[in-house]
Image (cartoon, grey):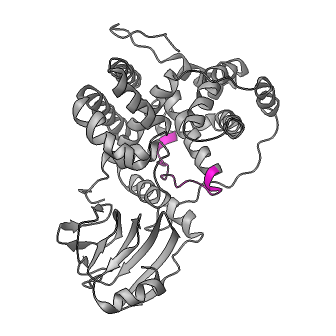
């Protein structure tokens, strides 16, 4: 596998470990960690720290019969649970679970660009983007934070080049025009905590329709 | 609180919680499980309440977590995680599943993990334990205000924005000992994976 050069910042891994990260960003963290041994070790270090804190916490009284109830269930046959979804092709298991299928349900945005919305609510959204080789995504700025994780191919913008496994962290002040690299279509996972704002009249009019 | 190992001692042992969990895994020991229950359930409940759950909801999660520990013990690998880290992750997964009513996104497991368990170097495992002890001592040595910020971050009291801010301040620049301890941990966890 190629060397991943753009990793997750510490605070995102820490927030994920602590369970404080918004869902859309959690998808990016879980997917990147699936691809990146270094960030997996960083996550495990954060969980070690979480465990150390947990061990030191003051005790809160637990209802007495909870212990009995737990012990009563130890010998009861384990309920059948569905296993974590397996990865499928370029998609880590976390994305397969979110899609509810092995492949994305693409919707065309025109110009060969496609997207598949994975989740969207007022706290943020996560979607897959398909950008044909050499094509650009419309110039846009961000109302908040946008994380873009490359699953296939590559893209470049004003800040650098991103290949498979790389994460771009775009702040609200970044105004950029990502362009897919040559050869292979770029497929990436993009998560934001605010709606994107496109420059130019047509994309802005389309935005409510396509939810991009 | 486990005091089976003391900082400054040359001899480091696996902490007793980890030993209990290994007994649950290898011997299905209910006595060891009882010790894990007694140690972790009051602390898990406190953590879940601090991250915003009601007492009753927290106890439901504690019950699920304890049963998951019993049922998934065969997946536990003491060379990759201390018992408390493994339990911390299970608790977060379950808590978020309950809050969202949908599974939390989790990383794919490494396929080679179960196979490599037998071959693992005991020294490397003790290294992990030693670093965790150093981390604990570094946190203990902090001034109260900073210790509280770090605690709040990991128990789930802080929002992602607050963790981000704290990471730039208390967890980042000021507390280099903690950062160094975390970096050493990461480094060794990565090496363990590559062995």
Position of the C terminus of chain B by quadrant: top left
Q: Is residue A194 above or below residue B135?
A: below
Query: Residue at horizontal 30%, vertical 35%?
Result: B171
Q: Inspect this view and state whether residue B124 appears.
A: no
Q: Residue furthest front?
A: B145
Nearer the observer, B126 or B185: B185
Give how far across and how far down residue A147 sits, in percent.
35, 63
Q: Is the magenta stretch mostly helix, strand or loop?
A: loop
Nearer the observer, A172 or B10: A172
Query: Residue at horizontal 63%, vertical 58%?
Result: B102
Q: Is residue B191 above or below residue A210?
A: above
On whether residue B100 falls in the magenta region, the answer is: yes
**Residue B42 as seen in the image, left or right of residue B88:** right
On whether residue A68 falls in the magenta region, the answer is: no
Give how far across and how far down residue B26 sits, in percent.
63, 26
Query: Residue at horizontal 46%, vertical 27%?
Result: A53
Q: Inspect this view and state whether residue A105 appears.
A: yes
Q: Is residue A79 above or below residue A27?
A: above
Give how far across and how far down residue A209 sits, in percent.
48, 87
> Which image quadrant is residue A161 in?
bottom left
> Which image quadrant is residue A111 in?
bottom left
Q: Which residue lies furthest to the top in this view?
A: B9
Give how far across and how far down residue A3 sits, in percent.
25, 56
Nearer the observer, A89 or A58: A58
Q: Give the range drawn in magenta.
A: B99-114
Query: Residue at horizontal 27%, vertical 66%?
Result: A163
**Residue A98 as seen in the image, left or right of residue B162:** right
Q: Is residue A79 above or below residue B102?
A: above
């Amino acid at each position: 596998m190629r060397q991943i050069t753009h990793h997750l910042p510490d605070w995102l891994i820490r927030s994920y470990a602590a369970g404080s990260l918004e869902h859309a960003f959690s998808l990016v963290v879980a997917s990147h960690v699936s691809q990146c041994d270094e960030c997996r070790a960083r996550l495990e270090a954060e969980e070690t720290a979480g465990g150390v804190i947990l061990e030191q916490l003051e005790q809160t009284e637990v209802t007495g019969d909870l212990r009995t109830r737990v012990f009563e269930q130890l010998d009861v046959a384990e309920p059948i649970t569905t296993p974590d979804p397996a990865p499928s092709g370029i998609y880590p298991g976390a994305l397969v679970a979110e899609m509810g299928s092995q492949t994305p349900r693409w919707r065309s945005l025109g110009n060969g660009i496609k997207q598949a919305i994975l989740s969207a609510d007022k706290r943020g959204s996560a979607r897959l983007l398909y950008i044909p080789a050499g094509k650009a995504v419309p110039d846009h700025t961000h109302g908040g934070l946008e994380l873009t994780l490359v699953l296939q191919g590559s893209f470049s913008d004003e800040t650098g080049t991103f290949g498979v496994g790389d994460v771009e962290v775009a702040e609200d002040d970044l105004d950029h025009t990502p362009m897919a690299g040559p050869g292979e279509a770029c497929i990436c996972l993009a998560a934001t905590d605010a709606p994107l704002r496109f420059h130019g009249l047509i994309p802005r009019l389309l935005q409510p329709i396509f939810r991009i | 609180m486990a005091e089976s190992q003391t900082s400054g001692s040359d001899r480091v042992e696996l902490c007793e919680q980890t030993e209990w969990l290994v007994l649950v895994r290898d011997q299905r020991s209910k006595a060891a499980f009882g010790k894990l229950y007694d140690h972790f359930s009051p602390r898990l409940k406190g953590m879940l309440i601090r991250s915003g759950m009601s007492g009753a909801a927290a106890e439901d999660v504690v019950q699920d977590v304890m049963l998951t520990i019993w049922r998934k013990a065969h997946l536990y690998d003491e060379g990759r995680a201390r018992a408390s880290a493994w339990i911390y992750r299970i608790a977060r997964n379950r808590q978020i599943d309950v809050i969202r009513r949908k599974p939390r996104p989790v990383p794919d497991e490494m396929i080679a993990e179960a196979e490599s368990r037998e071959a693992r170097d005991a020294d490397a495992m003790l290294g992990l334990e030693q670093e965790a002890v150093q981390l604990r001592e570094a946190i203990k040595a902090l001034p109260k205000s900073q210790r509280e910020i770090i605690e709040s971050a990991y128990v789930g009291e802080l929002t992602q924005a607050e963790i981000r801010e704290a990471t730039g301040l208390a967890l980042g620049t000021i507390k280099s000992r903690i950062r160094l301890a975390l970096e050493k941990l990461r480094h060794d966890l990565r090496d363990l994976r590559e062995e």
